[in-house]
Image (cartoon, rainbow, N blue to C red):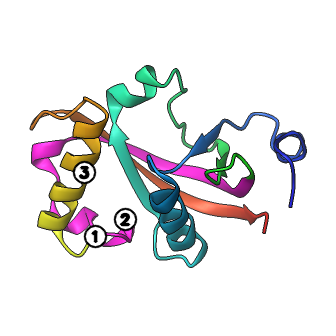
């Protein structure tokens, strides 16, 4: 397994980040990405500022960490969309991998955003399409 320093040496412009807000959610999402079932993720636009984390940028490769802070995957951002929570549509749910349908997505993201203190029905969501560049496992 690579260290963060070794992963950053391979991808010098990369930002490191952690999927989810718990160890179990992080592990689930990493597994979905590894198996190709998840190619889209999203978060509240304001969550990036709250975490002092740069926004994803199309073309940039970033490094997804496990809950313990070890590099797991290098991911290239393919596209970014801005969509209000209330305007999310069913067609954007399947590539996110962990949700059965739009109702499941709304329930899951509302709970996640409430835990972060960011939920509003019209909260602006950043929807990121990405591809795996390298799996460090």
Q: Residue at x 37, y 65 (%)?
A: 96
Q: Secondary structure at mark 3?
A: helix
Disc nearer the start of the sequence (3/2)? 2
The reply to whether the magenta stretch includes residue 81 is: yes
Q: Residue at x 74, y 51 (%)?
A: 70
Compared to residue 27, the image places residue 43 above or below, namely above
What span is in magenta?
71-98
- Location of the C terminus (image quadrant): bottom right
Compared to residue 69, the image places residue 66 above or below, namely below
Is 42 left or right of 16, judged from the image as shown? left
Kindly indicate whether the residue at mark 1 contacts the one at mark 2 (C-beta within 8 angstroms): yes
Is 114 left or right of 77, judged from the image as shown? left
Mark number, residue 55: none
**Inter-mark Cα distance, 1 to 3:** 10 Å
**Inter-mark Cα distance, 3 to 2:** 12 Å
Q: Residues within 10 Å of mark 2 (few under 14, many from 20)?
A: many
Is 114 left or right of 7, judged from the image as shown? left
Q: Residues within 10 Å of mark 3 (few under 14, many from 20)?
A: some
- Location of the N terminus (image quadrant): bottom right
Q: Nearer the viewer, mark 2 or mark 1?
A: 1
Residue 54 in the image: state x and y as whole percent.
Answer: 55, 26
Residue pointed to by mark 3: 109
Disc nearer the start of the sequence (1/3)? 1
Q: Nearer the viewer, mark 3 or mark 2?
A: 3
Q: Secondary structure at mark 2?
A: helix
Q: Residues within 10 Å of mark 1 (few under 14, many from 20)?
A: some
Q: Residue at x 55, y 49 (%)?
A: 77
Residue pointed to by mark 2: 96
Kindly indicate the quadrant of the structure image that contains residue 33. bottom right
Residue 112 in the image: state x and y as whole percent.
Answer: 29, 46
Residue pointed to by mark 1: 99
């Amino acid at each position: 397994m690579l260290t963060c320093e070794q992963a950053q040496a391979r991808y010098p412009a990369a930002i490191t980040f952690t999927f989810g807000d718990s160890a179990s959610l992080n592990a689930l999402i990493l597994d979905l990405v590894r198996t190709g079932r998840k190619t889209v993720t999203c978060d509240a636009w304001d969550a990036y500022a709250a975490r002092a984390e740069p926004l994803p940028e199309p073309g940039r490769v970033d490094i997804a960490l496990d809950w313990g802070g070890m590099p797991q995957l290098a991911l290239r951002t393919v596209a970014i969309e801005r969509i209000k929570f209330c305007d999310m549509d069913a067609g954007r749910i399947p590539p996110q991998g962990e949700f059965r349908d739009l109702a499941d997505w709304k329930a899951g993201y509302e709970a996640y955003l409430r835990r972060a203190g960011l939920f509003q029905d019209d909260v602006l969501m950043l929807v990121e399409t990405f591809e795996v560049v390298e799996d460090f496992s």
